[in-house]
Amino acid sequence: MALEQLVDKIIKTDVLVIGGGIAGCPAAIKAAEHGLDVTIVEKSKIERSGSAGQGIDHYGIFPRDGITKMELLRRWEAYQSRFNGDGRFGDPNIIYKYYDSAFWALEELEKMGIPMKWDDGEFYWMPHGRYGGVNRIMLRVHWQNIKPYMAGVLKESGVNVLNRIMIVDLLTNNDKIVGATAINTRTGEFIIIKAKAVIIATGLFARCYDPETPLFWKYKFRYHWCPATVSGDGWATAYRSGAELANMDITGWHFRARDDLTLSFGNLNLNDGIAGKFLTWKGEEFIFANAHKYHELEQNGKTPIYQTLEHLPDDYHKRMEVAYVDERLISFKIAEDRGFNPRTHWYELMPNKPLNFITASGISIDENFKASAKGLYAIGDCAAGFHSCGHAVVSGLLVGDSINTYVAEAGDLAVDEAQVKSQKQVALAPLAVKKGTEPMELECAIRYICERYVGQFKSEGKMREGLKRLASLRRVFLPSLMANNPHYLMRCLEVRNIMDLTEVHIKACLERMETRGNFIRLDYPEKDPSRDNMLTFQHIENGKMKLEIRQVPELKPEYARERK
Amino acid sequence: MAAKIDFKRCVGCGRCYDLCPIDVFTWDEEVNMPRVTYEEECWHCGICWMECPKRAIDITFPASFW
């Protein structure tokens, strides 16, 4: 059968960008500047999609005001260690490169016409840092409309923009990625996008755990980040194509604000650098509680714990409110409906527990953002150890700026029809199922496995039981997923991605026989020194998951020299 | 609960249907109006609410969020 008969549409492009967020858009725009034919696909609508859909209030980390790149790197590593314990959890060379390119990216954004300056025409450097100290390295930005701005620039740049397209799987030719198959989530069209290079920019993964505010009834998408993003589509498709994932044992850890204004959970102080106070219910102040500290507080009857801004003067609250306007306007509505005043409210913080894979996990990349499969790149929150809006923009611009060298020598490789056929079969199967399982039911079953058998306090027996149950869910229920329209077909494909990543996650945790930072194994309560600076990498080889534990690279000497 | 359309105010411009990141709306071709079809998937992000030019969308927060 010819390829044309197999699919509804074939698109040919030089560069396929998967995900139209704040990493994908700059990458596509920059690649198009180099004269490449670029196609960007987005599961939602670029104007308001992804983690930045509601807006952004602060951007980037810059080496300035006496703070060197080396100092920023040290802070990044300290931040990682705050959650993950001693050691390095990401390639310092990649992080260094990010700080090295921060001002270049700022210029590029300005050239695109993205508003970077404050109302008075000057940059507004945040006066205080994350932990209350003065640092002046982050920009406050009025970016409620960052996504409409970026969508506008995309339109002018000649990039082929396809909204409401969800990727099914990547296409391979031997060891090279040569495109992807996808469905239109409204029409159900099955399409092929042939590409010389593929950039994955689909953001984070989180949907194998319960949302931040888990007291839901029927609203099961109550995540802090866009639930369409956190299904981990990019990670799962990359993994299935043979690319390597890193750090899948390391989940993000945060306190969740019980009275979540959706702006921030437990890090209200981040916004405009305003330092909140952490208090026990009796009003005793404490600095910061990790999993162990929270446990101790609970055992001593000191919980609930709270965060509040009530001690701050009026002008701080006014600044804070501008941040709400810039990043999550809906916050005002929530406070109003719930009948509390954000200025004086004590936000109850829920226990620390795994939440999303935000600190260091994702698609394993080298210094040039190349994934381990040829022709595949990962940027933004997708890439291991590289999570924030600043990282997203910079990594997008860097890849967009350099991908033409790869495209020039990539050649025009054929797509394997048998592969397309099998991907189509898998993708469209739920449409033929009449009395089957709803995708959300299966998703909740997966989330329950992670909550119950993995969670915060891990042990071998629990995780083996979880894996066993996951395997039987996969055997019995994955084939019975049903969708009566393309919308639910999208949800079915998401569940498949969530299921694959959950298995990778549990296996990574099982292989890590130690306790370090927030990674707690009840059966291995000590730190294993042989795992210092070692990370878990997983990929598929001949249909089987292969797990490797490798050392994090050292910072290159030429970078380290800058220290003086 | 979730996103609710006030059809007295809605002019059928389609912004909510166009922009919702979760695609909870569908378009009713017969009357040229949006419908909240996948209400249970609404994550209360407020994009439809802030983008609606006629303030025809209200977001209400269910008891399970309290």
Image (tube, coloured by chain):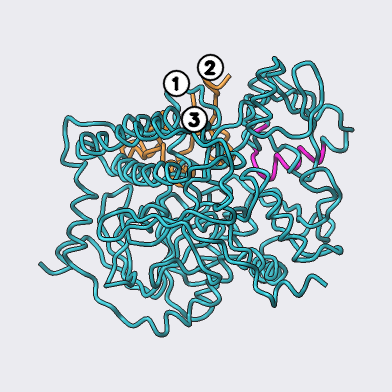
Chain colours: A cyan, B orange
Residue at 45% in and 66% down: A371
Disc 1 and disc 2: Cα gap in Å?
9 Å
Q: Which residue is mark 1?
A: A217
Left/right placement of residue A420 relative to residue B62 reads left
Q: Which residue is mark 3?
A: B3
Indicate the quadrant containing the N terminus of chain A: top left, top right, bottom left or bottom right.
bottom left
Query: Which of A408/A98 is in front?
Result: A98
Residue A319 % position (x, y)? 81, 41
| Label 3 packing within 10 angstroms: few (<14), some (14-19), many (20+) | many
Residue A339 % position (x, y)? 69, 18
How would you classify the magenta stretch by its main secondary structure? helix
Question: SS at mark 2?
Answer: helix
Query: Which of A454/A240 is in front?
Result: A454
Residue A160 % position (x, y)? 42, 67
Q: Earlier in the sequence, mark 3 or mark 2?
A: 3
Report in which chain the residue with disc 3 lies: B
Disc 3 and disc 2: Cα gap in Å?
15 Å
Answer whether labels 1 and 2 touch (C-beta < 8 Å). Answer: yes
Report in which chain the residue with disc 2 lies: B
Answer whether labels 1 and 3 touch (C-beta < 8 Å). Answer: no
Residue type (three-letter) at the residue carrying disc 3: Ala
Q: Which residue is mark 2?
A: B63
Query: Which of A291/A150 is in front?
Result: A291
